[in-house]
């Protein structure tokens, strides 16, 4: 004779289903999260020692940007690969054991796809992207992937900083190197943060570039496109900030307004 399920079995089944639902919600939230190592303020005042490994960073996203230990070049994260654009203009794939003092990554799933008209400079590119963002919710965080067949582009990277570390706006001019390419293909990787994130990250757009052959790249300073291109954007409603535990961070005064210094660093070439 077959009896009805016991209460204990039903309870166990319900608990299993609840745990599975919670895990599914957790996995979904992680996919919709921008994961950030430290704050931009921290980097600006001179916290250049890496404290999160590249291997760990790759567990939190497959697209993004940042920098490396001692600000040794620019980071471009694309298709799960972490590229290091060095101060001599070359690009290498970073080792999992390398570390980062500041970076931002997410699991990229395009929520918005839009065709861009040719743009004559980075400001014109920003205007087109702003129009897309403002139409879809300007107070979300966005990741951008923009693949371009042909463009003229200028980007920069930098040589590693030396101790004792000074503020980034003061030491960057002596360490940075800029490079230009004409009629090249490549990918723009960028993040957009709303203005109320000022201090945590750059308000508005922060662009990095890597060439199609992955041999050149860095922090993008200027660009003009020759033809139309397709922008793919991922809106992320969740934000996860990982702060360093070291005293050099925890005892820093980060209360000042750094907007002018951030603007100087963003556009310095």
Image (spheres, helix red, strand yellow):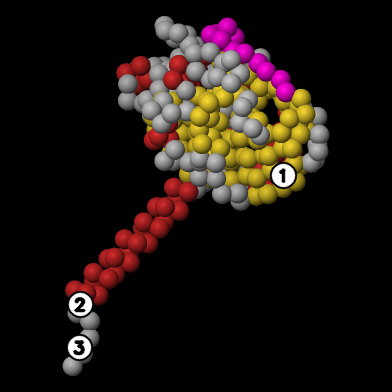
The crowd level at tag 1 (other Cα within 10 Å; few <14, some 14-19, many 20+) is: some
Q: Would residue 118 be seen by someone viewing this image from the given angle?
A: yes
Q: Would residue 262 be seen by someone viewing this image from the given angle?
A: no
Separation of residues labelled 1 and 3 (CA atoms): 61 Å
Image coordinates of residue 99 in percent, x first then y, are: 41, 25
Q: Is residue 153 above or below residue 29?
A: above
Judging by the rendered image, the residue that carries numbered circle 2 is 7
The quarter of the picture where the N terminus appears is bottom left
Q: Which residue is drawn at the image coordinates 43% and 35% (left, top)?
A: 57
Report whether 135 appears left or right of 33: right
The crowd level at tag 2 (other Cα within 10 Å; few <14, some 14-19, many 20+) is: few
- Per the rendered image, the range of residues in magenta is 169-181
Judging by the rendered image, the residue that carries numbered circle 1 is 230
Q: Is residue 197 above or below residue 142?
A: above
Please tell me whether mark 1 sits on a helix, a strand or a loop.
strand
Picture disc at residue 149: none
Q: Which residue is drawn at the image coordinates 65% and 16% (left, top)?
A: 178
Q: Which residue is drawn at the image coordinates 50% and 24% (left, top)?
A: 67
Report whether 220 appears left or right of 241: right
Nearest to N terminus: mark 1 or mark 2: 2
Separation of residues labelled 3 and 2 (CA atoms): 12 Å
Image coordinates of residue 217 in percent, x first then y, are: 62, 26
Nearest to N terminus: mark 1 or mark 3: 3
Picture disc at residue 3: 3
Q: Which residue is drawn at the image coordinates 42% and 7% (left, top)?
A: 163
């Amino acid at each position: 004779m077959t009896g009805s399920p016991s209460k204990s079995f039903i309870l166990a089944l319900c608990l299993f289903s609840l745990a599975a639902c919670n895990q599914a919600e957790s996995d979904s939230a992680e996919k919709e999260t921008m994961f950030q190592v430290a704050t931009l303020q921290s980097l600006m005042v001179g916290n250049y020692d890496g404290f999160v490994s590249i291997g760990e960073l790759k567990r939190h996203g497959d697209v993004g940007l940042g920098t490396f230990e001692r600000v040794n070049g620019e980071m471009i994260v694309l298709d799960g690969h972490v590229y290091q654009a060095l101060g001599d203009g070359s690009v290498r794939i970073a080792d999992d054991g390398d570390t980062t003092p500041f970076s931002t990554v997410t699991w990229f799933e395009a929520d918005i796809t839009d065709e861009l008209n040719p743009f004559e400079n980075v400001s014109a590119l920003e205007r087109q992207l702003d129009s897309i963002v403002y139409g879809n919710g300007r107070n979300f965080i966005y990741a951008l992937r923009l693949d371009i067949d042909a463009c003229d582009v200028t980007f920069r990277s930098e040589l590693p900083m030396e101790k004792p570390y000074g503020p980034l706006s003061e030491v960057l001019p002596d360490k940075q190197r800029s490079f230009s390419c004409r009629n090249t293909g490549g990918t723009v990787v960028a993040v957009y943060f709303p203005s109320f994130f000022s201090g945590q990250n750059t308000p508005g757009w922060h662009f990095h570039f890597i060439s199609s052959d992955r041999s050149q790249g860095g922090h993008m300073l200027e660009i003009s496109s020759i033809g139309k291109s397709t922008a793919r954007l991922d809106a992320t409603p969740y934000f996860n900030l990982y702060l360093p535990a070291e005293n050099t961070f925890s005892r820093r005064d980060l209360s000042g307004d750094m907007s002018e210094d951030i603007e100087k660093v963003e556009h310095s070439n």
